Image (cartoon, grey):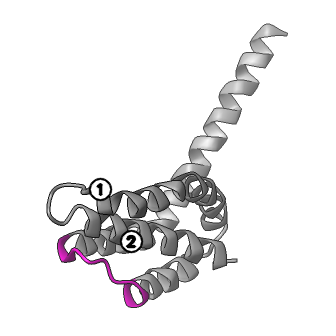
Amino acid sequence: MDTEIKETFKGIINLANTLASILEDGKISIIELPALAIASSGIPSLVENGKKSLKTFKKMTPSKAKELAVYFENEYDITNDEIEKQVEDGIHLLSSTYETGLASFNLYKGWEAWITNFKNLRRA
């Protein structure tokens, strides 16, 4: 279940590391263009995989979300330590607020369905 999330995250980390390496000196040289093109070509599939991963993530239990957060923190290293800290903080925030966020999302979806039903009743 969490394999597609792990693969998506791996792709994002690889892209971030490639871009950080290319932009380390603040400019893009001709020699770096092939690496930039290869890295950029993966963005559409990352977006598509991200959508699938989000659907999977919504079905996870809070304990599985926390387990994934620990996995990501231990498994991946971003070249830029400042960005790595921000990503890790974001993952921990997401995993710690997962249950509340999921409940809020479900509440929103319920509210949206209620509004739609109400509008349909008014038209009838």
- Residue 112 place in picture, x, y as percent: 64, 34
Tell me what residue is drawn at x 44 percent, y 82 percent: 72
Q: Position of residue 95 (x, y in %)?
A: 44, 73
Q: Residue beneath label 2, please?
A: 91
Q: Residue furthest left?
A: 25
Quadrant in which the C terminus is drawn:
top right
Reading the image, the residue beneath label 1 is: 30
Tell me the quadrant of the picture where the N terminus can be found: bottom right
Q: Secondary structure at mark 2?
A: helix
Q: Which amino acid, mark 2?
A: Ile
Residue extent of the magenta highlight:
73-82
Pick the front one: 4 or 20? 20
Q: Residues within 10 Å of mark 1 (few under 14, many from 20)?
A: few
* Residue 69 placement, left or right of 114: left
Residue situated in front as seen by the camera: 102 or 56: 56
| 62 displayed left or right of 25 | right
- Check residue 79 for magenta coloring: yes
- Residue 10 vertical placement versus 50 (above, below): below
Percent coordinates x, y for residue 20 in the rendering: 27, 66
Identity, as a three-letter code, of the amino acid under mark 1: Ile
Residue at 29% across / 56% down in the picture?
30
Q: Secondary structure at mark 1?
A: helix
The crowd level at tag 2 (other Cα within 10 Å; few <14, some 14-19, many 20+) is: some
Task: Count every numbered label the image shows and give the total.
Answer: 2
Quarter of the image where one finds residue 34? bottom left
